[in-house]
Image: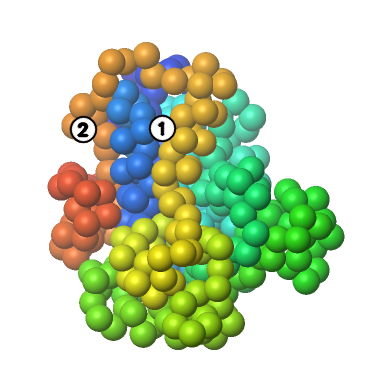
């Protein structure tokens, strides 16, 4: 995309670098394309090393830093960590690696900010083992609501609880987001978390803390019931990216970006990833092999 001679350096017309363990982050890329039609994106999915959700924090950090450096070297003006597992474990390491002139936006803090601003009270958070094991959502919410971390209760009286749901990303990756089997699996998890009473979730909001989960929106809605707010992470993150670019004077001045200006790379390209990428982005996209580990 950017040859060394033409590489823009932090110019507003440079692409936004965005990465995930695989193709789940395309839900965030799609929300960004909708919210910021003038921005170009360079997306990288580390399909060769997924799932990050079952890897150690050290390994996720190693992969994430390498990818962020690659995106910066390609001339990206900002880095979006479109993966909850990487956001939970590697945000500081990524920010340190790319330096203060390159904004880094993760998918956790914008959602935390949104919930705090709206004073949502009983919050359930689901995600991979890496995300939930890190305790990042609970810790950040409790800290932002200015209380001592501990029992999940904040001084504003909000209750924050986290529960790992490791099977869900694989089922969605497999295209089973609308399969009848999704319902008992989601119900079992919410039940085990202690959030179900009389067939409905007793939460004010359920945070879908994995970039795959928005694809199964209807299944979550069916199980949780009509009164639970499903938190739309990708849309919130897209707004946060737009605000950060604006704040730093990095927003594109182009009228609009053509879809052809986006670039979508994965570290291991299979037919299945090609097929699935359309479901995650909403339209067909040209997925190509590339990125930091590519020796093409
Ligand atoms: N996209 C990842 C996330 O948001 C889930 C998939 C994985 O485990 O790699 O956590």
Q: How is the image coloured?
A: rainbow
Q: Which residue is mark 2?
A: 259
Task: Relative to 200, say whether 154 is above or below.
Answer: above
Secondary structure category for the residue under label 2: helix
Closest to the observer, 226 or 93: 226
Give the percent coordinates (x, y) of residue 84. Answer: 51, 57
State yes or no: Cβ of the residue under disc 2 lies below 8 Å from any atom of ligand 1: no
> Could you say which quadrant of the image residue 157 lies in?
bottom right
Closest to the observer, 284 or 36: 36
Q: Residue at x 78, y 71 (%)?
A: 151
Closest to the observer, 110 or 86: 110
Closest to the observer, 68 or 30: 30
Give the percent coordinates (x, y) of residue 135. Answer: 66, 65
Task: Relative to 43, say whether 164 is above or below.
Answer: below
Give the percent coordinates (x, y) of residue 35. Answer: 36, 33
Instruction: Confirm whether residue 277 shows in the render.
Output: yes
Quadrant that contains the N terminus: top left
Q: Residue at x 43, y 52 (%)?
A: 232
Residue 247 as seen in the image, left or right of residue 32: right
Give the percent coordinates (x, y) of residue 26. Answer: 33, 50
Counting residues from the N terminus, which is met first, the one under dot 1 or under dot 2?
A: 1
> Could you say which quadrant of the image residue 258 lies in?
top left
Residue 136 as seen in the image, left or right of residue 46: right
How many numbered marks appear? 2
Marker disc for residue 201: none
Q: Which residue is mark 1?
A: 16
């Amino acid at each position: 995309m950017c040859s060394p001679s033409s590489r823009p350096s932090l110019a507003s017309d440079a692409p936004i670098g965005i990465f995930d363990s695989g193709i789940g982050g395309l839900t965030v890329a799609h929300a960004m394309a909708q919210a910021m039609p003038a921005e170009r994106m360079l997306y990288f999915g580390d399909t060769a090393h997924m799932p990050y959700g079952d890897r150690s924090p050290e390994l996720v950090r190693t992969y994430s830093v390498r990818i962020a450096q690659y995106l910066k070297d390609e001339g990206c003006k900002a880095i979006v960590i479109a993966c909850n597992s990487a956001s939970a474990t590697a945000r500081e390491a990524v920010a340190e690696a790319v330096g203060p002139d390159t904004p880094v936006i993760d998918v956790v803090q914008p959602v935390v900010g949104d919930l705090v601003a709206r004073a949502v009270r009983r919050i359930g958070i689901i995600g991979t083992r890496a995300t939930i094991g890190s305790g990042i959502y609970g810790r950040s919410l409790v800290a932002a609501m200015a209380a001592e971390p501990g029992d999940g209760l904040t001084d504003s009286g909000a209750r924050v609880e986290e529960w790992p749901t490791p099977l869900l990303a694989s089922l969605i990756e497999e295209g089973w987001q609308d399969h009848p089997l999704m319902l008992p699996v989601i119900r079992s998890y919410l039940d085990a978390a202690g959030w179900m009473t009389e067939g409905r979730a007793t939460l004010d909001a359920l945070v879908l803390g994995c970039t795959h989960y928005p694809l199964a929106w209807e299944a979550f809605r069916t199980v949780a019931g009509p009164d639970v707010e499903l938190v739309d992470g990708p849309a919130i993150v897209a707004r946060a990216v737009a605000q950060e670019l604006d704040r730093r004077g990095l927003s594109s001045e182009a009228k609009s970006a053509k879809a052809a200006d986006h670039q979508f790379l994965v570290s291991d390209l299979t037919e299945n990833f090609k097929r699935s990428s359309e479901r995650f982005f909403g339209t067909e996209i040209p997925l190509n092999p590339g990125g930091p580990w590519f020796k093409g």
